[in-house]
Amino acid sequence: MALVSTPAVILHAFPYGETSKIVRLMTRDHGVQSAIAKGAQRAKSRFGARLQVLSEGTAQLYLKPTRDLHTLAEFDVAVQRPVFAAHVARFAAGAALAELVLRFAPPEPHPEIFTLVVRELDHLAAVPAERLPAAALAALWAVIAALGFTPSVDVCARDGRTLPAGKIAFSVPDGGFLCTACARAGKTTTLAAPHRGVFEQLVAGSAGEVGVLAARDAAAHRRLLVRFVERHVAEGREVRALCFWEGLA
């Protein structure tokens, strides 16, 4: 059993027994790990109030190579991000991002995904409220891309043809835009030229170019993202934090 120290973000935490907590961590050097924080719920715990979801810091872990549950020796907070606890829309976006990483990130270390998670959480915590819907969509599409699932927006997802300008059909089962011929063969969502442009910018992570989304447009983009994730990333299973985020007014 080795003691290691690694930058980490708390993705999830829940009570275990009467005195302890289980934390799920995205670590830079050891991927996603589960650990027990013994005594974390005691009044005089050495962890205090540091084990808050979406907090970032340095975790000291006793790693047990043959087990899935390790021991958290210490967690030194660098960034706590209390704004998530005070703003339901920010928390919903951060929780959706955390669940995507928690459930679908590969088990081996991926420092680039860790860096992406930290960057997007910082942005979601700081972005003005009116720009949050676009920022959340761009952050989630960035994570989806990092996990290896990116919609096809440059060529037809079904036959690889070059796509014309203007309005376009998006097929969730095919995972991207379809040319006119392929769109006739199945159920699709039609995006007018302006909405197509917004979608392409969000998938590219360019929320700043999108600016402020109308509530109705933001809701439509959330539905499209959730349907894509459930079909291609979650293989038909529900992603509960994403569903909560999708349902926000």
Image (cartoon, grey):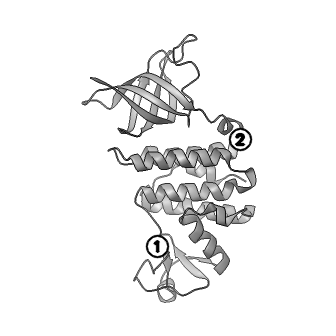
* Tags 1 and 2 touching, CB below 8 Å: no
Residue 72 placed where, x, y %?
41, 23
Residue 191 placed where, x, y %?
62, 77
Q: Is residue 237 above or below residue 3?
A: below
Which quadrant, please, contains the C terminus? bottom right
Residue at image location 49% in from the left, 50% down from the top: 116
Q: Give the amino acid type for the residue marked by disc 2 in the picture.
A: His
Residue at image location 67% in from the left, 56% down from the top: 133
Residue at image location 49% in from the left, 59% down from the top: 229
Q: Which residue extends farthest top? A: 44
Q: Residue 152's mark? A: 1
Q: Earlier in the sequence, mark 1 or mark 2?
A: 2
Q: Nearer the viewer, residue 2 or 100?
A: 2
Q: Give the amino acid type for the residue marked by disc 1 in the picture.
A: Ser
**Which of the 4 image quarters holds residue 168?**
bottom right
Question: Which residue was labeled with disc 2?
Answer: 87
